[in-house]
Amino acid sequence: MKNVRRASPALRTVMIAATAAASIPLLAACGSSESAETLTFAAIPAESSASLESDYSNITELIEQETGITVEFQNASDYAAVIEGQRAGQIDIASYGPFSYVIAKDSGVNLDPVAAPTSDKDQEPAYTSLAYVAADSDIQDLADLQGKKVCFVDAASTSGYLVPMKGLLDEGIDLETDLEAILAGGHDASLLSLDSGSCDAAFAHDTMLNTLVTSGQIEEGAVRPVWESEPIIEDPIALNLDTIEPELAEQITTVLQEKGNKPALVEAGICASEEECELPEEIEYGYLPVDDSDFEPIREICAATDADACHSIN
């Protein structure tokens, strides 16, 4: 990594808020696998959703069924809360964004990424980041964002911050000095801010717009993409090796990699049918194996951008 740069005032504010969020007692009363009584599974929503626990319910039920251990789900406030929760031994299993996983792993949290989602069992787990503008905007590409008000997601978001930052730098635009960056807090909030006119452009992951159009929160055709990134490795589920015993960790890994998919969930009696089987973020198939080496491209982007969040947990 390069030497740490002085964070901009806006990003320093975000980092302070994120660190404070990590201490919020949303992670209190969590057990660890040392007692073999409960496993704590944490995730953050890609959108402002109260249904996150139900989105993961089939996966947590699968882990319970296969291990015989109760899984308690925690809806975390942000990436920093998940990272610090695992560092403190309060979270056993977590769903990360690729960038937040790298921040956690490379800052010393003893993690093992074991599975990531895909909608096609024959395709590697991957997604993309997109930049959107209003349908009638004069903006045609990233170069046109110079001097504009641009919405991002979170300073530790992969598709909502890090990858866009690299795309902008490739166009000679410094996110901190050449535009007004707004951290919206969620992929949905980023696009909704664009739709309301609060920003000139917005970044979000590749399925968020469809979700908002389907739910009626954004009219079809109201916004359009002007840029799409190269494929990004998908969000990993990572096990905390400081709280999960090796034999149990191996069992959970096998369960997620081999049975964390709709056909297997139907066979296990957890889902009635593949059509009715709900997985997080509308995953159409399920999870496939990943390991730490799959996240080297994220580390390379982190080194190229020298993003403040790459250093914020160290």
Image: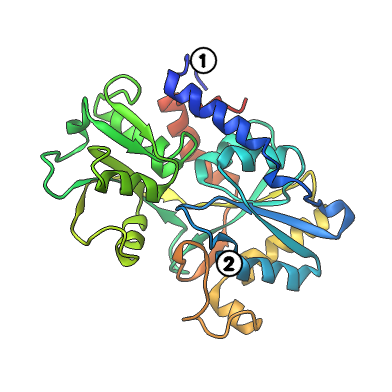
Left or right position of 191 against 247? left
At which x and y percent is residue 298?
Answer: 47, 38
Residue at point 55% right, 60% down? 52
Q: State which tag comes first along the sequence, 1 or 2.
A: 1
At which x and y percent is residue 67?
Answer: 78, 68
Q: Element at badge 1?
A: loop
Position above or below: 18 against 269: above
Q: Residues within 10 Å of mark 1 (few under 14, many from 20)?
A: few
Left or right position of 39 against 83? right
Position above or below: 21 against 187: above
Q: CA distance from mark 1 to mark 2?
A: 42 Å
Disc tally is 2
Q: Amino acid at mark 1?
A: Asn
Tell me if residue 261 can be seen: yes
At which x and y percent is residue 15?
Answer: 53, 27
Quadrant of the rendered image containing residue 306: top left
Q: Amino acid at mark 2?
A: Ser
Residue beneath label 2, please? 54
Residue at point 22% right, 29% down? 148
At which x and y percent is residue 73?
Answer: 67, 58
Tell me if residue 129 can be seen: no
Position above or below: 148 against 206: above
Left or right position of 263 against 284? right
Which one is nearer the viewer's eye here, 184 or 286? 184
Residue beneath label 1, please? 3
Residue at point 62% right, 25% down? 314
Which one is nearer the viewer's eye here, 32 or 196? 196
Tag of residue 98: none
Q: Residues within 10 Å of mark 2 (few under 14, many from 20)?
A: some
Left or right position of 48 against 230? right
